[in-house]
Amino acid sequence: MTIAAPRTASGTTNTHDPCDDDCGIRDVLDRLGDRWSVLVVVELTKGTRRFHELHRAIPGISQRMLTLTTRRLMRDGMVQRTVYPTIPPQTDYRLTTMGRSFSAAIASLADWSRQHKSAIASSREQWDADRPARNDL
């Protein structure tokens, strides 16, 4: 089954993709909303960190995932990496100005989460009690 593209008043095909308006938001949220990116940014709000300091501070993250996450955050302009010409080389990671502004948004979300944690837990308990046979979430 094929669905034709909508036509405009002049009869031409409307090729405007509705995703054009919100995919930029989706792209950013997909990247910055993943748990590893958030945890790296939260850790870097405490100051400059070396790779192994980040790795130790973020439970459950593999070295490969930390490498991928820091690279993505650097690509997005959130994190700056500095390599020092020492033997062995030392590498520091720090938040950029944009990364610091993102960390402020994360802090607001964390505050909201703490404020509503009990209400959310109560709501979940009520939901589960009303639907004991269904465990589809």
Image: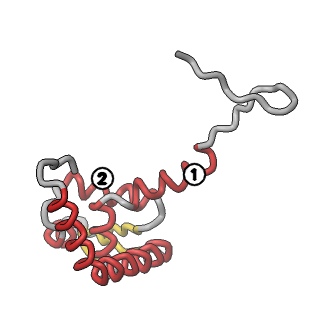
Q: Is residue 5 left or right of residue 134?
A: right
Mark 2, residue position? 68
Q: Position of residue 109 (x, y in %)?
A: 37, 76
Q: Position of residue 100 (x, y in %)?
A: 44, 78
Give the numbered dot on residue 86: none
Task: Residue at 48%, 51% (x, y): give it.
Answer: 27
Q: At label 1, which amino acid type do we have?
A: Asp
Q: Is residue 92 left or right of residue 73?
A: left
Task: Residue at 57%, 51% (x, y): give it.
Answer: 22
Q: Is residue 27 left or right of residue 21?
A: left
Q: Position of residue 60 (x, y in %)?
A: 13, 60
Q: At label 2, which amino acid type do we have?
A: Leu
Task: Residue at 31%, 84% (x, y): give it.
Answer: 115
For this rendering, which residue is in front, 86 or 124? 124
For this rendering, which residue is in front, 73 or 116? 116
Task: Residue at 27%, 61% (x, y): give it.
Answer: 36
Give the numbered dot on residue 22: 1
Where 115 falls versus 80 (above or below)?
below
Where 118 falls versus 19 (above or below)?
below
Q: How is the image coloured?
A: secondary structure
Helix, strand or loop for disc 1: helix
